[in-house]
Image (cartoon, rainbow, N blue to C red):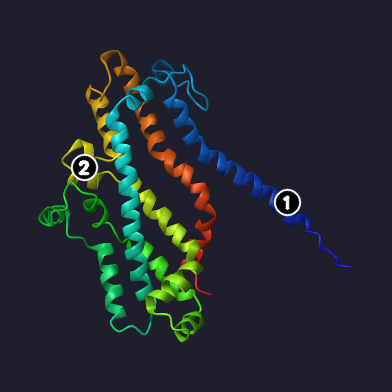
Amino acid sequence: MVSTIRPSRGYRVFQGVNGVILTLVVLITLYPFVNIVARSFSGEKEIRAGDVTLWPQGFNLTTYEIVFSDSMFWRNYGNTVLYTVVATAVAMVLTTCYAYVLSKHHLKGRGALVGIAVFTMFFTGGLIPNYVLITSLGLKNSVWAIALPNAISVFNLLVMKAFFESLPSELEEAAQIDGLSTYGTLLRIVLPLSKAVVATMVLFYSVSFWNSWFSAFLYMDRTELMPVTVYLRNLLAGATGGTAAGAGTENLTQVNANIQAVTIVLTSLPILCVYPFVQRYFVSGVMLGAVKG
C-alpha cells in the first residue's frame, strides 16, 4: 500500500494565494486586449465618452468595411504573409547553421565568430550606409530587402547555440561512426531533438517579421509591394492628418475614433491564432537553450 503525503496547511494556503494572484495577473493582462477589440466595434460617440470597457457600445463595422473593401489591403496582406514566410525560412536556415557551428568547442576561430556576432548587438553601420548597401546590391523593391538584413538575430543565435551545446556529444559521435556527414548529423540527429527551440525561434522570427514595417517603408517604392503594416500605418496617418484611405468625409470621424483599435486587431489576429500551436514548445525551448545543467 502506497502512502500519500498530504500537503501542509501552509502549503495549501500558499497555493490558494498563488492561484488568486495569478488569476488577477491574467485578468489584468487580458483587459487591454479585450478593450481594444471592443473599441474596434464601437461607435465614435461611445468611444469619446469613455463608455467602452469590455463590450462594444454603439456597435458598428464602419472602419472594418472601409479597410476590407480596399483591394490594396488584401494585396498588402498577401505581401506580409509572403515576406514573413520567406524571411523566417531564411533566418532559420542561417541561424541554425551558424549556431550549430558555434556549438563546436573544437572549432578553430570559434571565439572570433562569436565575437563578430556579439559585436553586431552593440554596433551597426547606421541607417544611411545600410540604405546605400541595399540599393547598390539591387535588393530594393524585393523580399530580400526585408529578409537578408535581418536574417540573424544574435539573441536567437546565442539561445540556439546554448541548446545545441546541451545535447549529448555521444549522439553525434555515434552518427559519425554510422557514416553520417556533418549535414546528415544536423538534419537527421540534431534537429529532430531540437523541436522545442526550433519552434520557439520560428515564433520569435515570425512575430518580428510580421510586425516589421520600417524596412518595407524604407526599401519599397511601390504601394503594391508594401506589407499590411505599412498600409495600416498609412491609414492611421491619413486619418490623423484629415484624410483616410478609402474613407469618405462622413466616415472620417468614425475612422479617427477607432482606427487604432482596428489596426491593432488586424495585425495581431494572425499571430494570436498561431501562438497556441507553438506555445507548448515556447517555455521549454527558451529554458533548455538558456540553462545548462
**Left of 219 or right of it: where is 44?**
right
For residue 284, above or below residue 58: below
- Location of the N terminus by quadrant is bottom right
For marks 2 and 1, give the one nearer the viewer: 2
Q: Which SS class for mark 2?
A: helix
Q: Nearer the viewer, residue 291 or 280?
A: 280
Question: Which residue shows up at 47% across the image and 36% down it?
Answer: 33
**Which of the 4 image quarters holds residue 44?**
top left
Lower position in the chain sequence, tag 2 or tag 1: 1
Question: Which residue shows up at 22% across the image and 37% down it?
Answer: 224
For residue 258, above or below residue 85: above
- For the question of whether residue 211 can be seen, the reply is no
Q: Nearer the viewer, residue 222 or 26?
A: 222
Instruction: Check contact, mark 2 vs mark 1: CB within 8 A.
Output: no
The residue most toward the right is 1
Distance between mark 2 and mark 1 Cα atoms: 54 Å
For residue 72, above or below residue 22: above
Mark 2 — residue? Answer: 217
For residue 250, above or below residue 267: above
Image location of residue 180, percent across then percent down: 43, 80
Circle 1 residues within 10 Å: few <14, some 14–19, many ≥20:
few
Q: Nearer the viewer, residue 261 or 137?
A: 137
Amino acid type, residue under disc 1 in the picture: Val
**Left of 32 or right of it: where is 146?**
left
Image location of residue 248, percent across then percent down: 27, 16
Mark 1 — residue? Answer: 13
The residue most toward the front is 179
Image location of residue 240, percent across then percent down: 26, 26
Question: Which residue shows up at 24% across the image and 57% down it?
Answer: 148
Image location of residue 130, percent across then percent down: 16, 55
Amino acid type, residue under disc 2 in the picture: Phe
